[in-house]
Image: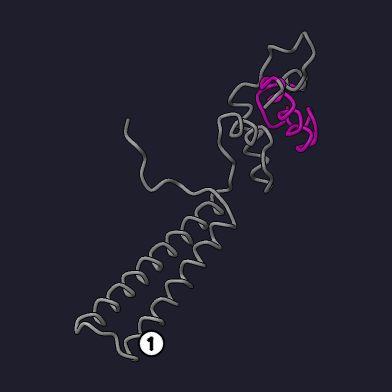
Amino acid sequence: MSRNPYSALKAAFDADVDRLGGVVAVANRTRVGPALISRYGSISDQNITTHVPADVLLDVTMEIARRGGEPETLRLLADLAGFKLVPREAAESNEQNLMRHVVDTTRAQANLASTVADALEDGKIDDAEQLAIDVAAAIVETEAAELRNDMKRGGNVSPLRTKLS
């Protein structure tokens, strides 16, 4: 991000305040008055070091989320920290789809390996065994394609494991 992150934070908070109806509407939902709400979003020299406290930010964020919106300040904070803000439902749904495809692909690969091993037991592959291998290979290709399609749709998922330092 090329601009000052503190100025960006103020601009994002100001956008969230506007989304909720302005400084008076936000002041009615928080512990601070309209003048302070205004200062939290102001980048003027006299207000440049005045920042929104966490509890006020939480009140604003939760109200926007309650209304079904994406809080701009929260999105900016995630971005500044190197993360992407994704609604929980979308992330969990994507996680479940990806894990289902990984399991299905692994099962199909194991079935293909088993089918090939069975066919090679007598040292030759007959027409019926070749057909069984072709069918098992096609299933692997289908499962892998579904996995790739889910990955193309994008989305963030929770790591299955974290590295220990």
Query: Which is more toward the observer, 18 or 89?
Result: 89
Q: Residue at x 75, y 12 (%)?
A: 47
Start and end of the magenta stretch?
Answer: 4-33
Q: Residue at x 31, y 87 (%)?
A: 129
Q: Residue at x 26, y 82 (%)?
A: 119
With respect to residue 38, does 28 lie above or below? below
With respect to residue 13, does 109 lie above or below? below
Q: Residue at x 72, y 20 (%)?
A: 7
Estimate how packed mark 1 is, as few (under 14), some (14 to 19) or many (20 or more) residues with alpha carbons within 10 Å: few
Quadrant location, the N terminus: top right
Residue 78 lies in the magenta stretch: no
Extreme residue toward the top, this view: 46
Q: Please state the horizontal and vertical placement of residue 91, each as a whole percent of the image.
A: 53, 51
Type of amino acid at the residue the image marks with label 1? Leu
Magenta segment's dominant SS is helix
Query: Which is more toward the observer, 50 or 153?
Result: 153
Extreme residue toward the left, this view: 122
Task: Name the secondary structure under disc 1.
Answer: helix
Query: Which is more toward the observer, 135 or 85?
Result: 135
For disc 1, the marked residue is 131
